[in-house]
Image (spheres, helix red, strand yellow):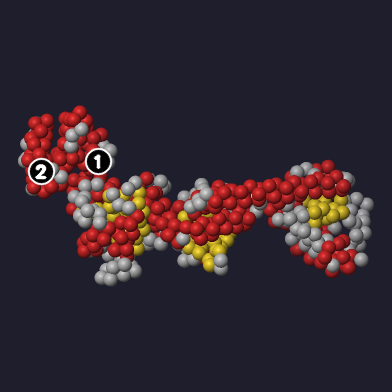
Amino acid sequence: MGADRLEDDSIRTDRPDDVALPRIRDVLDSGMLARGDPEVLVGGPALDARVRWVHVSDSAEVAGLLDGGELLLTTAAGWSGTDTALRAVAASLADAGAAGIVLELGARFPVAPPALISACRAHGLALIALERVVKFVAVTEAVHRRIISGQLEALQERQRLHELFTGLTLRGAPADTVVRAAAQTLHAPVVLETLGREVVTAELWNETARDVLADWATLSRTGDGLLAVPVEARGVRWGTLVALPGPEHPAGRMTVLELAATALALARLADGPDEWAMLPARDLVDAVLSGRHTGDEDVAARLHAAGLPVRGRVLCVLIAERADATALDALVAALTGGDAFDRGAVRALGAVHDGSAVVLVSSPRPLPSTVLSRAAADAGTGLAAGPEVSTVAQLLASVRPTRLLAARLRAGEVRRVDDRPLTRLVSELGDDHRLQEHSERLLAPLIRYDEQHQGDLLRVLAAVVAHPGSRTAAASASHLSRSVFYQRLAVISDLLGADLDDGQTVAALHLALLARG
């Protein structure tokens, strides 16, 4: 009879998801068997087996009635006491996929047979002995309530997740928002990568970029401890959504990733490939300019994971003020697609941040001035180039002076920070109060005048210090006629009580303007 039932696949029960099932150790910890004074004879990893159901039987042939995942409650009244028979029972239960055995000691076996213990240990089958009698029906009811409750929780959580990711899709949420939602749900880092294993976007949860993204391609390739789901639709695969180790989730960690991957695939179909292409640069630029990183190693890991190599390379930041996405694309194209300069060897990532196009560049050798000039001309903007450095720390330090310089350039004009010592000095001094006091003290009369008369004296002064050798060029930069320009100069000189032809005075005023930003 038992053999017939075993062969009849039509009566196999539906299996709930493992994550919703209690482990044997959960059954023990819950106190369901506490009255029996349980003793774990074979435990360790065996206690992590999931309990799909509870089966009560004293038959030595009970394995033929099992479907896998059952916790067997038995007094072993029908078992033979020979070592060979006990080893056979343990082997048959292991082959049937039983979760474990709870053996109530008594008349049949006053103590647990050593042969049974060794056989269960050999098969990785949990074995718990009960020193006292318990009501098996009470244990069965309690475990089954736990199983059903877990299944209900899993169903409710799946519904919540379905609504969450469907809502994100309908609202047109970008990829980084979907990845962030997945990480928050899993309480673990989640990474969206391309087919080339470059990071599109990552939510690090409570980790650092150095810990998660350092040498990401190698970690992703080996897959150690990672859970991965392809992001694909209509037979086309664009990348992979990867979760790092984390706690279990009632609906199953794989279910969370699959729903998030579906939302990402639908967004990719709707938005096209450009959205994914922009994300790494946008995240990086925002982290670099806003200081949302935990240090040099954090930024280095992000750069490398996004496909921008840093070791043994020349690094540089380029900034163009008053630039849009079109200008940004032109800058990146001019840097990476030139015929004369290391085609394919220059890597650049850029994004528009607060009205400025910011490009991070990694090159095998310094960028020629011709390349920078062509990039500025193609973009139709002024272009400030930071110092060409070899470390990420130096790259981060170069951002501030490059931004200061970029704010003062005309369309098509190219300047390097290394050629602007005052700009670099102001940047290195940072927010030193003495520099700020110097600026306020010198410029206060002009600031008050401009505020009271809606004037432009500060703008005129900026043109003067930018063109100290040519009043004609300064007037042109001020967009004023020569006569009006000279009138403004006279007012500035009177208010400041200063000679604008004196080199030291001009240098001091230039420093004050740079400090004011």
Question: Is any part of residue 54 visible from this angle?
Answer: yes
Q: Which mark is residue 481?
A: 2
Above or below for 66 versus 289: below
The residue type indicated by label 2 comes to Ser
Q: Are marks 2 and 1 in contact (CB under 8 Å)?
A: no
Residue underneath mark 1: 517
Residue positioned 65% across, 53% down in the render: 252
* Side of 315 relative to 476 (left or right): right
Above or below for 505 versus 369: above
* Side of 512 relative to 312 (left or right): left
Q: Position of residue 389 (x, y in %)?
A: 28, 57
Q: Position of residue 80 (x, y in %)?
A: 91, 62
Q: Position of residue 485 (x, y in %)?
A: 10, 40
Residue positioned 23% across, 35% down in the render: 436
Q: Which of label 2 and label 1 is nearer to you?
A: 2
Q: Residues within 10 Å of mark 2 (few under 14, many from 20)?
A: few
Q: Position of residue 393 (x, y in %)?
A: 33, 52
Secondary structure beneath dot 2 equals loop
Distance, label 2 to label 1, CA atoms, is 26 Å
The residue type indicated by label 1 comes to Gly
User: 184 or 410: nearer the eye?
Assistant: 410
Q: Earlier in the sequence, mark 2 or mark 1?
A: 2
User: 432 or 238: nearer the eye?
Assistant: 238
Residue 486 placement: quadrant: top left
User: 65 or 103: nearer the eye?
Assistant: 65
In the rendered image, which quarter contains the N terminus? bottom right
Residue positioned 28% across, 68% down in the render: 338
* Side of 492 relative to 211 (left or right): left
Secondary structure beneath dot 1 equals loop
